[in-house]
């Protein structure tokens, strides 16, 4: 295939289609990603069916938009998978490798649809590899029926029968029919087509074959080679009399028999978009009729729920409106309180009662609405976890290790916005676990461990947070080496390193510029270490913790809020401005008078539970230089991020509240120390503190008393 | 204009189908089960039949075969719910010309009827 890297490409789809295409393709690719590695050995019929369907859907949708290379490649993959599904081939590791290579190319090809620029991926060698997997066939019939992409090779006896018919004066035709995607029983349309063809011609060959069609297993295309005394117009008319026929191509075969016969295009060879959401849902309702479908149905089917795709922007819009409602609710409640105190003595009891009832009802409804919309933005974390087995397989292979990955908690749901952000840090931590955590098989044997290391990734919800843990049974982290390295690099003083507990020393792994790997390997990348992971997680109001026992393994746990759209916060004021301190970082709040404050090296310091926390005046730290009066008692709020803690000095505590996060971007741009704003019950603005960056800026790492 | 026999035991479905068809200018006759359909077919020789599958007294498949025995040129489309693929296949083998899957869009109903009457 001629490659023309960088050439512009044209596809038949508009912006909306593109979105649907990309989303659906991403889903199928993900499914293939996690399923293909399980193919080796004795695959479950259910798994096979899923893989086959994913390849088939990709073929259909790529063909529909005119992405010929993608359609050809998926066609070849589908052909291989079909052979496995029919039990004609058993999956070998060569086969899985060829399929995985195909999958990698499919990602790039899918991306071309978005970029509309030719990536230069050459599918020819990939198709050749897939064909090669098939050509080591032991069943001759299978080989005859397994065509190269876009070609048809007739089995010998059929070719012979056709030759006889031609000698009797009949003309050979290739018939290619595509059935409309809207058709709900395509197999029956195929049967009807067969009926029409039988009436006018000798039907030599069909794909799918008659048995498949009669058992209800045919899909949206029918290819037939027939011999007839009629001409192509009469054949076309007969075929067009059947409902749901989308395209019918009839070609007089001249000098092409016994074959191979070129099919008109991959687009015709592929089923047209078997991708319409509702149809898929309906198809699953059908009673299983083919043995394969019956097997798939007998196996515990994955729960399919009715769902619609909603643009996240639209949901964000709804969320914003709900945010406004929440504000109105709070405002109404305030008015209610004022009214009832004013009207207490007047004879307006009934009116105020009514009003109270209405406001509290509004409050309940708003809460419910907020909750429901939040839920509609939730996705199971599965979509992130399914990518991991492939990653572990690849990384383990690269560094010559044996690793088994166990995942749990795929059903755990979290907000879309969090899902998008969680993937990179998780992948990084997992790579570390395989590359640096798990030992080589020899080392493991010597340590009396099984050769295969185990890495488990677990997700769970607790309160309003999601937790993701990556645990390995590898060599653990050598805190002695960590101390040495931190001192060598001048990141920690020798005395501090000496005095630090093992637990505290473990935290050095998060200091920028420290890498414990003996060599920078290809696997873990360069320069991107745990410090970046922590920064990214904290930016999302999350936390990352590490536990490790030298010789036995490590566990890294990420804690993130379920959503980034709202956050639980402690509301405080400083110099007449209201601030929201995310509760995830707040550990304690005390009055100034009960706080154990000292001056250390000229800085105000709070002694709290054996730790010395620098005391930061919140208004000052945020650059509020307006004149202020400080005549009443103030409050100290302790906040921590990982091992670092500070105490914020504020004027008043207003209480805990759920706040709807709004971006500052449009108003004043990004400001240091702030992550956003929120509208308060009285309509005024509150500022949301970026406590992670303030803590990091103000507190030295691992300050301990 | 052509006459269509709508066979369905559910009054609502008969009404909907009838409405779609009569608004498009067809003459509509209704029957509420297979036996009724055979009587009505004999009496008025409609141009096409829309036949539900699951019905009391006599089901659609049996009625199809009976009507085809009376009139081998009878043009009948089956109206099916999902999950009846094998029955539809048998109906097609027994001479049904087309099928509609419930709930059918008016456009699809009219397209099928147009094809049947062609």
Image (tube, coloured by chain):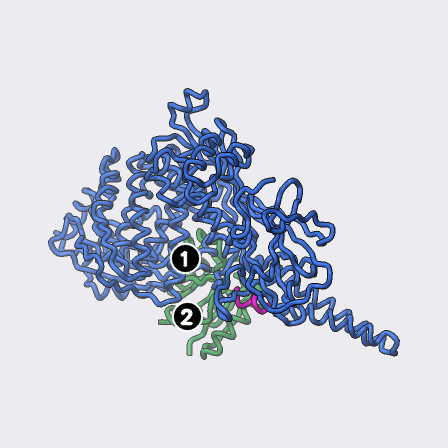
Residue A283: x and y, percent?
Answer: 45, 54
At a point 25% along the width and 38% down the height, the residue shown is: A133
Q: Which chain is green?
A: B
How far separated are the C-alphas under marks 2 and 1?
38 Å
Q: Chain of mark 1?
A: A
Q: Nearer the viewer, residue A174 or B31?
A: A174
Circle 1: element type: helix
Instruction: Indicate whether A114 appears above or below A287.
Output: below
Up-down relation of residue A639 to residue A20 (above or below): above
Residue B35, percent across and down?
53, 62
Residue A489 placement, left or right of A587: left
Q: Residues within 10 Å of mark 1 (few under 14, many from 20)?
A: few
Question: Which numbered disc, 2 or 1, marks the residue closer to the eye?
Answer: 1
Q: How many marks?
A: 2
Q: Is residue A404 above or below residue A688?
A: above
**Quarter of the figure with residue A409:** top right
| Depth check, front residue: A261 or A313 | A313
Magenta range is A316-322
Q: Residue at x 29, y 43 (%)?
A: A101
Instruction: Give the SS element for disc 2.
Output: helix
Question: Residue visible at 45% across and 36% down?
Answer: A487
User: As drawn, which residue projects farthest toward the front?
Assistant: A602
Chain under callout 2:
B
Q: Which chain is blue?
A: A
Residue A320 painted magenta: yes
**Dot 2 and dot 1 residues touching (CB under 8 Å):** no
Q: Give the residue at x 31% y 49%.
A: A208
Instruction: Report x, y in % for residue A217.
Output: 38, 49
Question: Any mark on residue A23, and which?
Answer: 1
Q: Which residue is mark 2?
A: B113
The secondary structure that most of the magenta stretch takes on is: helix
In this rendered view, identify the residue nearer to me: A133 or A168.
A133
């Amino acid at each position: 295939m001629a490659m023309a890297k960088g050439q512009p490409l044209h596809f038949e789809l508009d912006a909306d289609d593109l979105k649907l295409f990309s989303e659906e393709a991403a889903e199928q690719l993900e499914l293939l990603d996690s399923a293909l590695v399980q193919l080796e050995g004795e695959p479950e019929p259910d798994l096979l069916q899923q893989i086959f369907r994913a390849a088939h859907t990709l073929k259909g949708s790529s063909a529909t938009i005119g992405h010929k290379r993608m359609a050809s490649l998926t066609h070849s993959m589908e052909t291989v998978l079909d052979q496995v599904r029919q039990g004609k081939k058993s999956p070998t590791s060569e086969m899985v490798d060829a399929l995985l290579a195909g999958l990698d190319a499919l990602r790039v090809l899918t991306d071309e649809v978005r970029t509309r620029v030719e990536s230069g991926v050459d599918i020819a060698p990939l198709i050749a590899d897939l064909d090669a997997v098939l050509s080591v066939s032991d069943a001759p019939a299978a080989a005859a029926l397994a065509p190269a992409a876009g070609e048809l090779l007739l089995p010998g006896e059929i070719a012979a029968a056709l030759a006889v018919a031609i000698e009797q004066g009949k003309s050979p035709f290739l018939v290619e029919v595509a059935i409309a995607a809207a058709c709900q029983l395509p197999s029956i349309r195929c049967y009807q087509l067969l009926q029409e063809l039988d009436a006018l011609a000798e039907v030599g060959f069909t794909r799918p074959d008659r048995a498949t069609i009669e058992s209800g297993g045919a899909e949206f295309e029918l290819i037939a080679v027939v011999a007839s005394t009629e001409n192509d117009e009469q054949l076309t008319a007969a075929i067009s009399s059947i409902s749901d026929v989308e395209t019918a191509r009839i070609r007089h075969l001249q000098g092409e028999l016994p074959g191979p016969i070129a099919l008109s295009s991959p687009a015709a060879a592929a089923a047209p978009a078997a991708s319409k959401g509702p149809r898929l849902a309906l198809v699953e309702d059908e009673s299983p009729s083919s043995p394969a479908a019956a097997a798939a149905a007998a196996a515990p089917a994955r729960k399919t729920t009715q769902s619609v795709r909603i643009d996240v922007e639209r949901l964000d819009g709804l969320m914003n409106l709900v945010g406004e409602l929440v504000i109105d609710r709070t405002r109404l409640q305030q008015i209610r309180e004022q009214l009832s105190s004013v009207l207490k003595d007047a004879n307006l009891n009934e009116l105020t009662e009514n009003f109270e009832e209405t406001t509290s009802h509004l409050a309940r409804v708003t809460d419910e609405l907020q909750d429901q919309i939040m839920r509609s933005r939730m996705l199971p974390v599965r979509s992130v976890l399914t990518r991991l087995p492939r990653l572990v397989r690849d990384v383990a292979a690269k560094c010559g290790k044996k690793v088994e990955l166990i995942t749990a908690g795929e059903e755990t749901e979290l907000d879309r916005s969090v899902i998008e952000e969680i993937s990179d840090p998780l992948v990084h931590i997992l790579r570390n676990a395989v590359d640096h955590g798990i030992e080589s098989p020899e080392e493991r044997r010597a340590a009396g461990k099984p050769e295969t290391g185990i890495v488990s990734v677990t997700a769970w919800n607790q309160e309003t947070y999601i937790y993701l843990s990556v645990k390995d049974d590898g060599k653990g982290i050598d805190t002695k080496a960590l101390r040495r390295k931190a001192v060598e690099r001048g990141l920690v003083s020798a005395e501090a390193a000496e005095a630090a507990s093992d637990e505290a020393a473990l935290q050095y792994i998060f200091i920028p510029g420290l890498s414990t790997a003996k060599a920078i390997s290809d696997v873990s990348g360069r320069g991107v270490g745990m410090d970046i992971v922590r920064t990214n997680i904290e930016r999302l109001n999350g936390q990352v913790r590490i536990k490790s026992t030298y010789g036995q393994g490590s566990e890294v746990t990420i804690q993130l809020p379920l959503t980034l759209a709202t956050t639980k916060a402690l509301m405080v004021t400083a110099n007449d401005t209201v601030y929201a301190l995310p509760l995830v970082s707040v550990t304690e709040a005390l009055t100034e008078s009960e706080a154990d404050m000292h001056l250390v090296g000229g800085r105000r310091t709070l002694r709290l539970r054996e730790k010395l926390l620098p005391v930061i005046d919140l208004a000052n730290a945020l650059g509020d230089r307006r004149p202020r009066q400080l005549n009443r008692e103030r409050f100290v709020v302790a906040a921590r991020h990982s091992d670092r803690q500070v105490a914020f000095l504020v004027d008043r505590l207003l209480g805990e509240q759920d706040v709807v996060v709004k971006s500052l971007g449009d108003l004043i741009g990004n400001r240091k120390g702030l992550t956003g704003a929120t509208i308060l019950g009285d309509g005024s603005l509150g500022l949301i503190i970026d406590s992670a960056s303030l803590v990091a800026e103000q507190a030295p790492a691992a300050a301990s008393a | 204009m052509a006459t269509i026999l709508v066979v369905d035991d559910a009054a609502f479905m008969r009404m909907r189908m009838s409405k779609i068809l009569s608004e498009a200018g067809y003459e509509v006759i209704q029957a509420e089960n297979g036996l009724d359909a055979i009587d009505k077919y004999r009496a008025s020789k409609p141009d096409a039949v829309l036949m539900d599958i699951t019905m009391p007294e006599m089901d659609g498949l049996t009625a199809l075969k009976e009507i085809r025995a009376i009139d081998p040129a009878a043009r009948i489309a089956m109206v099916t719910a999902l999950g009846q693929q094998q029955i539809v296949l048998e109906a097609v083998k027994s001479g049904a010309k087309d099928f509609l899957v419930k709930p059918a869009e008016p456009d699809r109903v009219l397209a099928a009827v147009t094809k049947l009457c062609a």
